Structure formats: C-alpha cells, structure tokens
Amino acid sequence: VNALLVGTVSLTAIGLPILSSIRDGRKRFAWQTIRWGYFISVPLASSIFFYSWDILNLLGQNYVEGETSLQILLLSLAPTIILSGVSNLVYAYGNYKQSLAIDITMGFARTFLYFILVPIYGSLGASVAFTAGSLAALIVSIIVTRKIGMIIFWKDLVLLFFIPMLIGFILQSLEINYVIGIFATITVSYISLLKLKVITKSDLRDIIDILPNNLSNQTSKLLRKFKGD
C-alpha cells in the first residue's frame, strides 16, 4: 500500500515545480494530476483489493489474517490522491497554512484513532485509523477547494474508481485465477476507461511529458514499439 501511495503522490510532487512556475491554469493542471493519479493507481489497487487473500497467501499463511486490513488500507488511496493534489496546489499558491491544515488534520486524526482502535482491534484498528485520517483530510481539502474556486469533477473520479472495482469484483466472483484476474483487471480497466473517454490519449501524452526526461523518453519508446511505429 505504501508503494502505491508513494508512487501516486510522487506524480503530484513531480508536477509541483510546474504548478509553481505557471501563472494561468494551475487549478486545471492540479485537477489533471488528480485524474492521472486515479488512472495510474486505481486499476492496480482494485486488482489487489479483490485478490488480496491470494497475494498475502504467497507471503505465508499467517499473513492471510491481514486481508481485511489490506483492503481497508487500499481504500485510503482514493482520498489521498485528491488531498495530495489540493495540498500541492495551495502550496504552489503560497497558501502554506491551508496546506499545513490538510497535513495536520490527517496526522492528528490518525494518531488520535491509533490510541483508541489499535489496543482493541490491533492491525485492523490501525488500518481503520489510517484510512479515517485520509478521509478527514479529504474533507478539509474539499473545503479548501471551495475557498480557492477549484472545481473537482466528481463524476470522472467516480468512474475512474468504480469501473476498475466493478471489473475486479466480476472477475473474482467468477473465481478466475488470481494471476489472470490481476492482469485482466488492469488491462480491461484501462481499455474500458479509454473506450468511455474518461481518459484520453492526450492524457497519456501529458503524463509522459511531466515525467523526468530519461523515464519519459523510455516510456515513449515503449509506446511507439507497442503501436508498431
């Protein structure tokens, strides 16, 4: 889960210099990074969510008990992407107090709930506390977006979240082998999102453009080879 969170949040971090340097279109660019974060992470998170038992079983039978904890932690990914994008935007504006408020809310809520839930529920309580902290920070982020006039298109985020989750649920319900199921969830999710035009080819180009030069060039070469160019 941390790997997914770091990988996703790093995308908004990469975009921070761009947000700081441009005068116009900051809110639009911040919104794009949020969409890209969902596009990159949610299909993979959805496949792990529904095949968490199989994945944890690879580590050992004792890890299987953490299935519910893992699923709850994965749910924290969705609000974290939004609050990270908003936090970077207000930071780029120089509104450091608003950025700090988001981080403090998340940290305080998690720490407070850790002391209450962990002694009672153990790792499950820790997962709930972690995710609840993200949700609390999300509420603060939404308040901040209204103050600065940033528009979040919730319909797009709902589609980006529920389409991969629905595909993962269907494949798991059909008892598809987890290796095939994980690969199919990711692949079918991307194809479906592109077909529905929730994500466009221009989004893919934009994501590649904001990556570091070496990584951007390598990714472009792979895409050209895949297309047969």
Image: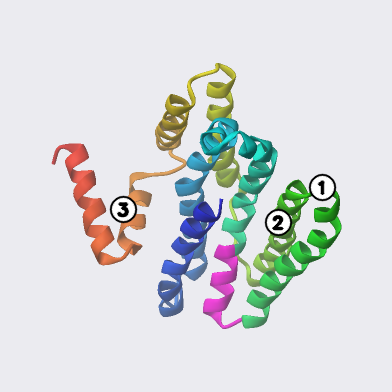
Under mark 3, the amino acid is Arg
Mark 2 or 1, which is nearer the eye?
1
Of helix, strand and loop, which one carries label 2? Answer: helix
Vertical position of residue 110 compared to residue 75: above or below: below
Does residue 78 lie above or below 163 as drawn? below
Coordinates of residue 137 in the picture (x, y in percent): 70, 63
Other-residue count near label 2 (Cα within 10 Å), few / some / many at <14 / 14–19 / ≥20: many
Point 49% across, 53% down: residue: 37
Q: Measure how far apart labels 2 and 1 are at the Cα level.
A: 13 Å
Question: CA–CA distance between discs 3 and 1?
Answer: 45 Å
Give, as a three-letter code, the residue at label 2: Phe
Closer to the chain start, of discs 3 and 1, is 1
Badge 1: few (under 14), some or many (20 or more) residues near its Cα, within 10 Å?
few
Where does the image place residue 214, in percent across and percent down from the top left?
A: 24, 63
- Main SS, magenta residues: helix
**Do labels 3 and 1 touch, CB within 8 Å?**
no
Q: Please, is residue 44 above or below residue 16 in the view?
A: above
> Nearest the camera: 33 or 147?
33
- Please state which amino acid type lies under the numbered disc 1: Tyr
Disc 1: which residue: 121
Which residue is label 2 attached to?
130
Give the SS element for disc 1.
helix
Q: CA distance from mark 3 to mark 2?
A: 34 Å
Q: Nearer the viewer, mark 3 or mark 2?
A: 2
Q: Judge from the rendering whether residue 61 lies leftward or rightward of residue 197; answer left or right.
A: right
**For residue 205, which numbered disc appears in the image?**
3
